[in-house]
Image (tube, rainbow, N blue to C red):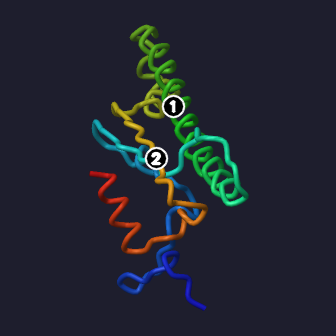
Amino acid sequence: MAFPNVLIEIDGKLWWDGGLVSNTPLSHVLDTQDAELLVFQVDLFAAAAKRPTTMMDVMAREKEIRFSSRTRQVSDALLKLRREREAIRRVLDKLPDTLRSDADVVALAAMAHEHPVNVVQLIYRANNWESGSRDYEFSARTMNEHWLAGR
């Protein structure tokens, strides 16, 4: 059985749609960051929306809440980690020079090291004609509409 838009083979390796694991790879981007970074994070599902009026609206809203909650959870956790590292760096800066070469201090400083990052969060606003199939409907018309919206 084939799973269109979910599994694809590239150069002999199978790749899954990243949305099956995480709708935003922000953790991976920041874990592998080696310089100052500007990140544009596009959330395809809004956390806030009008009240659903039909069963189809309810199903679409459920997906919006589920997917946007995961994105926000990841972003919030990464922001918390960055604040903790910043606090560690402030405390380490207060240590006397005699402690700066201590193995534990050096290890802690290495763990708290990070490069600056700015994350710009953009939220896609769905069209009225889009429904609960937004997470798997990738027709040419839909993709063209999304590309135009992105521009």
**How far from the left and from the top, in percent, is residue 62?**
68, 52
Q: Amino acid at mark 2?
A: Arg
**Residue 37 image position (x, y, % from top left):** 30, 39
- Helix, strand or loop at label 2? It is loop
Q: Earlier in the sequence, mark 2 or mark 1?
A: 1
Please name the amino acid that badge 1 sits on.
Answer: Leu
Q: Which residue is mark 1?
A: 79
- The residue carrying pointer 1 sits among few (fewer than 14), some (14 to 19) or many (20 or more) residues within 10 Å by Cα, namely few
Q: CA distance from mark 2 to mark 1?
A: 24 Å
Residue named by callout 2:
125
For the N terminus, the image quarter is bottom right
Q: Looking at the rendering, which quadrant does residue 71 occupy?
A: top right
Q: In this view of the protein, which residue sits in the foreground, 113 or 144?
A: 144
Q: Nearer the viewer, residue 16 or 2?
A: 2
Front-most of 117 and 91? 117
Q: Residue at x 45, y 20 (%)?
A: 89
Q: Position of residue 22 (x, y in %)?
A: 55, 56
52 sits left or right of 133 in the view? right
10 Å crowding of disc 2: few (<14), some (14-19), many (20+): few
Per the image, label 1 sits on a secondary structure element best described as helix
Q: Residue at x 60, y 47 (%)?
A: 70
Residue at 38 percent across and 36 percent down: it is: 119
Residue depicted at x 38% and y 81%? 10
